[in-house]
Image: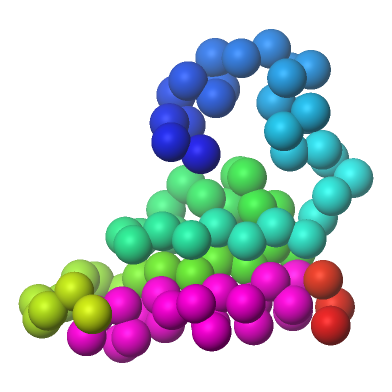
Amino acid sequence: MPSWELFEAQPATYRDSVLPPSVTARVAVEAAARFGWDRYIGSAGKFVGMSSFGASAPASALAKHFGITADHIVAEAKAALGK
């Protein structure tokens, strides 16, 4: 979702077609804080990103430190699907 503001400006029918209320297996991936993603992923959704204050290091080291890796994203997606 490139822009929360543009998404929220769309009619509810469009938003529900993109994020159907019946689909609860959702994963948000954000290189920054979780703030704001809960409204889109719901209580059963998974979040991959920073869960604490930022840090300073090379980007690849930070991604690994915060679990923003392909392996972790796949694991969270499987968990959201109950697999």
Write the residue at 84% across / 50% down: 23
- Where residue 38 appears, x then y in whole percent? 58, 52
Residue 67 location, quadrant: bottom left
Residue 74 shown in magenta: yes
Where on the picture, by quarter, is residue 20? Answer: top right
Of the 4 image quadrants, the one containing the C terminus is bottom right
In depth, the one of 78 and 53 nearer the eye is: 78
Residue 4 lies, with reference to residue 79, above or below; the image says above
Q: How is the image coloured?
A: rainbow
Q: Where in the figure is residue 7, as x and y percent of width and height? A: 55, 25
Say which residue appears at 31% left-offset and 60% top-offset. Answer: 32
Q: Quadrant of residue 68?
A: bottom left
Question: Is residue 12 depicted above or below 60 in this figure?
Answer: above
**Which residue is at 47% across, 31% downward?**
4
Determine whether 31 is above or below 76 in the image.
Answer: above
Residue at 56% over, 74% down: 73
Give the prevailing secondary structure in the magenta stretch: helix
On the image, the x and y values in percent for residue 11 come to 69, 12
User: Magenta stretch?
Assistant: 61-80
Horizontal side, residue 10 vs residue 83: left or right: left
Q: Is residue 53 visible?
A: yes
In magenta stretch: residue 10: no
Percent position of residue 79, x then y = 74, 79
Taking the image as shown, residue 41 lies to the left or right of residue 30, namely right
Q: Residue furthest front?
A: 70
Q: Give the mark count.
A: 0
For the question of whether residue 51 can be seen, the reply is: no
